[in-house]
Image: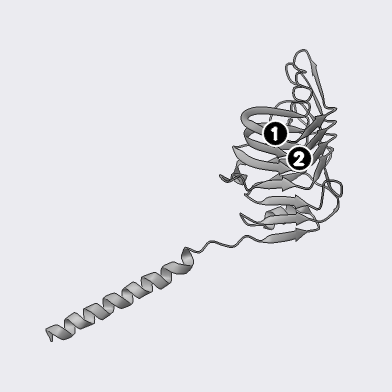
Amino acid sequence: AARKSILAAVLLGALVGMTLILGGGPAARAQPATTLVCSGPIQACIDSASPGDTIVVAAGVYTESLTLDRPISLTGAGSDTTIVLAVAGQRVLTVTGAAYSVSRTVAISGLTLAGGNPAGSRCPSACGGGLLISGGAQLLVQRVTIQNNQALDGGGIYVEQGSLALNATRILSNTARGNGGSGNGGGLYVGRGSAELVRDLIAANTANGVGGGGNGGGV
């Protein structure tokens, strides 16, 4: 009887071990990243994406003001053919800390961001006409054109808090306009953060400050 009890205990232990191994397998498996083809609205595509996904935006002109609030990448067909125009009184794109990625795989590429002009009287709400990076977000921007935007500070881009890497990007004809110490960084303004620039073109940007400010037409 004792030998049967010991054998039963061994068999039960083996079965329990098998159950734990089989049960633990799928739970440890990461969800695969997905490439989503988007013909608009772009914000709806962002809202339906999961972390790690890449959204490929079809060529076209889109009038939207976007918020990127998760670690996904946004890729257009090319900055000459995929153009995002801001809604009146808003910026083109806001990237929040929820898009944080240690490996900096969160990328914006192949787009033009234009026509941003956020309303308000102070930063960050009224800063960064084309792009605002906030909340510690880390972002790679490559082969993007940021053009004809305006804001209090950072007419083209405003890094409130976070990390920005620019690669082969054009920042053109943006304006920082303000008063009382604002109107700085016509093309790019970096606050509590950092920016890394590689092979970029920053030209024809303007910083207009009234009663102070007006520094850094380009950066």
The numbered mark, 2 or 1, whose residue comes first in the sequence reads 2
Q: Position of residue 87 (x, y in %)?
A: 82, 42
Q: Residue at x 72, y 50 (%)?
A: 74
Provide the secondary structure element on which disc 1 rests: strand
Number of numbered discs present? Answer: 2
The furthest residue to the front? 199
For the N terminus, the image quarter is bottom left
6 is higher (above) or lower (below) than 92: below
Task: Decide: is 216 above or below 27.
Answer: above
The residue type indicated by label 2 comes to Ala
The part of the image, by quadrant, that contains residue 6 is: bottom left
The disc placed on residue 197 is 1
Q: Residues within 10 Å of mark 1 (few under 14, many from 20)?
A: few
Camera-side residue of 5 and 63 = 5
Instruction: Say left or right for 7 vs 63.
Output: left
Q: Residues within 10 Å of mark 2 (few under 14, many from 20)?
A: some
Q: Which residue is mark 2?
A: 168
The answer to whether residue 69 is visible is yes
Which amino acid lies under the numbered mark 1 shown in the image of this protein? Leu
Q: Position of residue 110 (x, y in %)?
A: 78, 48
- In the image, residue 53 above or below residue 219: below
Residue 86 seen by the camera: no
Identify which residue is drawn at 62% across, 60% down.
33
* Residue at screen point 71% across, 32% down: 158
Q: Nearer the viewer, residue 210 or 159?
A: 159
